[in-house]
Image (cartoon, coloured by chain):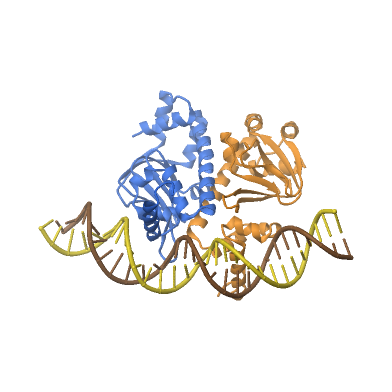
Chain colours: A blue, B orange, C brown, D yellow
Amino acid sequence: MFENLKKYIEDYSSTAVSEEEYTLIQQSFKPKKLRKRQYLLQEGDVCKYMAFITQGSMRQYSVDESGNEHIVRLCIENWWVGDYESYVMLTPSKYNIDAVEDSELLLVTNEIIQDLKMKVPAIAKTIAKMDERNFIASQRRLHASISLSAEERYLELQKSYPELFQRFPQTMIASYLGITPETLSRIRKQLLSKPKSA
Amino acid sequence: MFENLKKYIEDYSSTAVSEEEYTLIQQSFKPKKLRKRQYLLQEGDVCKYMAFITQGSMRQYSVDESGNEHIVRLCIENWWVGDYESYVMLTPSKYNIDAVEDSELLLVTNEIIQDLKMKVPAIAKTIAKMDERNFIASQRRLHASISLSAEERYLELQKSYPELFQRFPQTMIASYLGITPETLSRIRKQLLSKPKSA
DNA sequence: CCCTTCACTTGACATTTGTCAATGGCCTAA
DNA sequence: TTAGGCCATTGACAAATGTCAAGTGAAGGG
């Protein structure tokens, strides 16, 4: 299950990972399997690990006082998941993270990553690029959520991340878009009658 | 005007900046003054510079087909401004950035920053920490915009960044919150009648 | 100093989205 | 196989927010 991670690092850093480095990486990450609905993180706990998903799908969400879930992230293979704020600041998380499908993860603590960054240049490069992309992606999403209607946000998500629609039920897609499942259902119905250009 | 920047770097990196480093920094950044309403960046242009604000205030916003402005960022002294996506990817920006008050900026290109990062460790540390904070801040804002009502978002902004309310007109605060000025005006009126606890 | 402009407010009304309740389909576990 | 649960859909209604228009007051430019 480490091959995915190796490939990911080589892609992101545009650098080959040597055998020794690969061994070091394998020693640094802790494999973990989660069954559907099992938690990686629960609200109130500190997020000790970032997780690279080698198989399966995960969601990160908060629960408000009325018991409504608000999904802030949906993740699949070759994505990272974890509450970055809690991980970095060591504060209790306001989020839950659980498996949507049976999943396989590679866990790593911040301490170990900091160490790896120094020992494996490709890792440092990868993380720098990830930070860059993460920031850009969250800027885009923020822009969408401020500027676009629910329908436009739905269409943009379809365009940007079509994979997600195959992997997550509509209820979760709706929550991720910040709307209710009913509203999403109605939007989809409307889009059927005015396909594409109209 | 470089003292602010020096202080910022020392704070963020928890590292003292030597005289030589300070000289290098002064040579690397290009001072620029903008009068109120002058543009730092216009939609369609590539964002060549990140700007450190030493004085004044700036806004970053997009304009939709109906001509409505959507503010994605409001910035004051000791903050950075620029379209990061365009700056990093060298793509045309969808944003405009202009001065809300007369402002003084220090501009730097990506090329020079990459170079500085290698020559001045404090700069590398500062940028790493900025990336971290930026990502955390945009995650928080995203969470707010998905999970909270307009009123709650307003209260949270007041709590997190009270400075902004002294510096920007309500119209801009409203746009930043993703609502119309009329709605913000009504929210404020309501809050007067049920102060704090009720 | 006057005039324009702009920000803020308010009212009436439209639109969007949420809430609640009911239904039917599909999958899964006993 | 069947019962229960989850998901998607739909309808009726409620709440939140947007739109348009008008009016007031304060600030800035000529």
For the residue pair A135 and A146, the one nearer the viewer reads as A146
Looking at the image, is B17 positioned above or below residue A191? above
- The residue shown at (61%, 59%) is B174
Q: Is residue A50 visible?
A: no
Residue found 39% across the figure and 48% down from its top: A195
User: In the image, residue B140 lies at what x, y percent?
Assistant: 53, 53
In the displayed structure image, the side of residue A149 where residue B184 appears, left or right: right
Report the side of A102 relative to C30 (left or right). right
Q: Quadrant of the N terminus of chain A?
A: top left
Q: Residue B124, can we see it?
A: yes
- The residue drawn where x is 69% and y is 47% is B98
In this rendering, the count of numbered labels is: 0
Residue C3, given in percent of the width and then of the height, sits at 81, 62
Q: Foreground residue, B136 or A76?
A: A76
> In terms of depth relative to the viewer, which is nearer, A66 or B92?
B92
Specify the quadrant of the image occupied by residue B31: top right
From the top left corner, tell me how far across and down residue A45 is, in percent.
44, 54
Residue depicted at x 41% and y 40%: A79
Q: How far across and down, in percent of the image, does residue B91 sit?
A: 57, 35
